Amino acid sequence: MIRAGVLVVAAVWVLPAAASGGAHVVDDAAVEIVGTCHLESWVSRTGRQGVLVNSAPACTFRILPRIEFGGALQREWLRGEDARTLAGPSIKLLLAAPSHGPSLALVGTAAIDTRSGAIATASVIAPVTFTLSGRTRLNLNAGWTRNGRRDAAFYGAQVEHAVNETLAVMVEAYRLGGATGVQSGLRWTPKPGRIDVDLLVARETNLPPRFTFGLTVRT
């Protein structure tokens, strides 16, 4: 059952660094700041069952301010199985960002198994972001994922709240196929805001808790 938990994360493993993103499972509708690039990295451990390490760069260019281009390199060590490496591109299109009302985006990802060359995962996710107050946002996701030849629906919800200018808290719940998970954590963003540090804990169907440390750096 450990693989089911890893697949929940792998289905949405390329996420923006703005507010949500990083090792968060549920995405927000924002793209990276125009003219800025970031590198999201995190390591997750699920008891004695498995370790996942992810590195994901992405940029939003001034000539295409509504599109975030990215990619990811991911390494998995699962108990009782050979380690595998996944690599692939991602693209995020901001469809609507009104000054009042929800924002909407569309995120597409794909990854190959570098050992076999076969497509390992793919996903198309639609994030919607509602601003509930000056410090609180609600993010909703719905979409489709593929792992190998298996298709599954994905959906989730997340609430994030800025405690102050440098600290935020987050709680999210999500479902991928028959697997359900919840995750919560803290994000520290010291001024001038070019670095995010995430500390997260998650629990998924029939799995021990998963602990994650994440670091995002913007340039």
Image (spheres, rainbow, N blue to C red):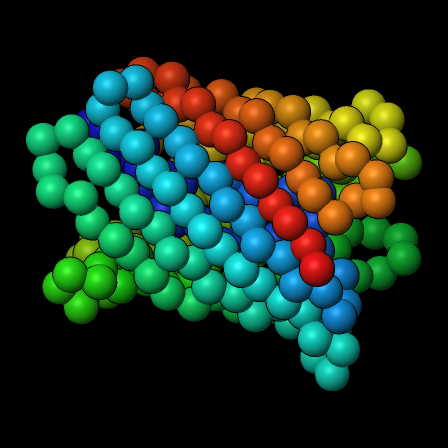
Q: Residue at x 70, y 49 (%)?
A: 18
Give the residue at the far bottom of this rendering. 63
Residue 131 at x, y percent in the picture: 81, 41
Q: Residue at x 71, y 30 (%)?
A: 188
Above or below 42: residue 111: below
Above or below 3: residue 104: below
Q: 216 or 102, which is in the foreground? A: 216
Figure quadrant of residue 30: bottom right
Where the N terminus falls, by quadrant? top left
Residue 212 seen by the camera = yes
Where the C terminus falls, by quadrant? bottom right
Q: 195 or 154, which is in the foreground? A: 195
Residue 112 at x, y percent in the picture: 26, 63
Residue 118 at x, y percent in the picture: 18, 66
Q: Residue at x 9, y 31 (%)?
A: 80
Q: 192 or 72, which is in the foreground? A: 192
The total number of labels drawn is 0
Q: Is residue 45 left or right of residue 106?
A: left
Residue 95 seen by the camera = no
Q: Is residue 21 left or right of residue 132?
A: left
Q: Is residue 66 left or right of residue 58?
A: right
Q: Is residue 38 left or right of residue 10?
A: right
